[in-house]
């Protein structure tokens, strides 16, 4: 009798792996294209290249919770560990209705690259739940978080995989995750997550760290380009912790924030938006829409706003080839993960527009998460000035290494970041060998 699970020339395998057949324009497909571009620069290490294209572990979990009205609803959750060759997994958890396995796989893979590019002793991981959190009460959100943590508890831990905040998650979510994991193992484990509240072992400087990283790497890129921050026009997509902090720091340095867009609208002001007033409006109304300190324009018009620096700090896949043709920016700072599609990368490069890629530009968050993890293990905590000084030094050194690699190989900063990161990951893979 024929084996029903075998493949023949005219019949595909019964079981196939989704990451080998990604959906068009999926984040995973974007990541795979980025890996393909770097393989020719890896020399003998390229023999391990397939390692980068396959997640080590992908967990899909059912998250049932009792709602406030007594009904039971089920949500789908994920935790993906892309590569653990250089250390435990590290990456955030997002709550969003658009979360998919392919998205989480790509985000985990970018964390592998990001951690290695910066030189942190971590592998890459990511998690998420497909949910609209704004429709849940606080108690429902707590029950969702605790059940999800229990479900993924078999693969997370301070030396295994350390979650952190991401889209629509925050310090409170991390507190619930830490408490749930601790209750399940019978001991307080502050190091199981980062981005926690300060009283539970969180680090000073963590909330603004990602946005600060965008500012630090952006300022260094501008210096190398021979441009002064003062007077530059900056357009930002996203006004949360990342975009809002970057806007605040660039405005303090003398730049003009001429446009801001989020899910509620787009506002522009050629003379510069009042960042502090906009932040108060967002806190009160949940978004930039309706802000009377600027002119409202259409969502697609944002990409053609006159600016010198463009900061996509929202979700992935935002800069398409068409939008790359529209922008007037000379510098793109990727505050979000994977905001630029490969075809758009080509357009930006052909137009001479420099891109500081996400894996270095927004690495401030994971860098301070690393600081938090170290502080938790030692039970010795640093002041915020010390945190910021260490962050600025690590990001500055990492960008210099990537910039030098780009100049030496005549490649883009993104490809250079992947070269640096992939060499480190695959060298670790080669030296560890295969077991058994």
Image: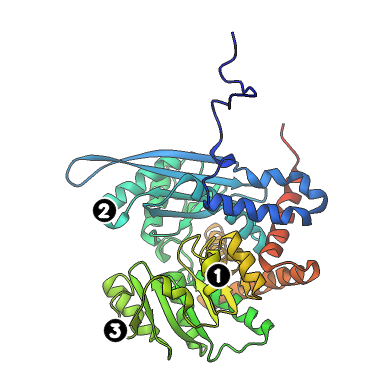
Name the secondary structure under disc 3: loop
| Image quarter (top left, top right, bottom left or bottom right) of the N terminus | top right
Sooner in the amino-acid sequence: mark 3 or mark 2: 2
Q: Which mark is residue 136?
A: 2
Instruction: Classify 331 as above or below 345.
Output: below
Closer to the chain start, of discs 1 and 2, is 2
Towards the viewer: 246 or 99: 99
Does residue 197 appear to the left or right of 348 in the view shown? left
Residue at label 1? 324
380 lies above or below 353: above
Quadrant containing the C terminus is: top right
Earlier residue among tags 3 and 1: 3
Question: Pointer 3: what residue?
Answer: 292
**How many numbered marks does the figure carry?**
3
Q: Tell me if I can see residue 381 in this picture.
A: no
Tell me if mark 2 has few (under 14), some (14-19) or many (20+) residues whose alpha carbon lies within 10 angstroms of its own. Answer: some
Taking the image as shown, residue 395 lies to the left or right of residue 184, namely right
Image position of 8 (left or right of 241): right
Q: Of circles 3 and 1, which is in front?
A: 1
Element type at mark 2: loop
């Amino acid at each position: 009798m024929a084996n029903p699970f075998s493949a023949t020339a005219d019949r595909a395998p019964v079981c196939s792996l989704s990451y080998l057949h990604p959906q068009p324009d999926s984040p995973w497909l974007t990541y795979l294209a980025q890996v393909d571009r770097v393989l020719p620069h890896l020399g003998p290490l390229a023999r391990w290249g397939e390692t980068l294209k396959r997640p080590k572990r992908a967990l899909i979990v059912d998250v049932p919770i009792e709602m406030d009205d007594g009904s039971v609803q089920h949500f789908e959750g994920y935790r993906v560990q892309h590569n653990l060759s250089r250390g435990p997994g590290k990456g955030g958890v997002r709550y969003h209705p658009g979360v998919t396995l392919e998205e989480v796989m790509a985000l985990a893979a970018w964390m592998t690259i990001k951690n290695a590019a910066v030189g942190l002793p971590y592998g890459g991981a990511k998690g998420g739940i497909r949910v609209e959190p704004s429709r849940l009460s606080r108690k429902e959100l707590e029950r969702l978080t605790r059940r999800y943590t229990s479900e993924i508890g078999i693969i997370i831990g301070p030396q295994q995989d350390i979650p952190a905040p991401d889209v629509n998650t925050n310090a409170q979510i991390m507190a619930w995750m830490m408490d749930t994991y601790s209750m399940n193992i019978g001991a307080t484990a502050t190091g199981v997550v980062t981005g926690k509240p300060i009283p539970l072992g969180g680090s000073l400087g963590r909330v603004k760290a990602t946005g600060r990283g965008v500012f630090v790497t952006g300022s260094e890129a501008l210096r190398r380009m021979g441009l002064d921050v003062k007077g530059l026009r900056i357009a930002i997509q996203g006004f949360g912790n990342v975009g809002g902090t970057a806007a605040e720091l660039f405005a303090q340095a003398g730049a003009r924030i001429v446009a801001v867009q989020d899910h509620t609208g787009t506002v522009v002001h050629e003379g510069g938006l009042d960042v502090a007033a906009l932040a108060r409006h967002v806190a009160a109304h949940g978004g930039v829409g309706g802000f009377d300190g600027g002119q409202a324009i259409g969502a697609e018009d944002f990409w053609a706003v006159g600016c010198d620096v463009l900061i996509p700090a929202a979700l992935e896949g935002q800069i398409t080839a068409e939008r790359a043709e529209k922008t007037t920016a000379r510098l793109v700072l990727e505050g979000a993960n994977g905001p630029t599609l490969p075809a758009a990368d080509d357009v930006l490069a052909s137009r001479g527009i420099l891109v500081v890629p996400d894996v270095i530009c927004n690495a401030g968050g994971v860098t301070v998460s690393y600081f938090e993890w170290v502080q938790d293990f030692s039970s010795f905590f640093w002041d915020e000035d010390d945190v910021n000084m260490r962050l600025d030094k690590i990001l500055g050194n990492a960008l210099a290494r990537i910039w030098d690699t780009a100049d030496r190989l005549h490649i883009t900063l993104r490809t250079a970041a992947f070269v640096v990161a992939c060499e480190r990951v695959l060298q670790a893979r080669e030296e560890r060998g295969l077991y058994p």
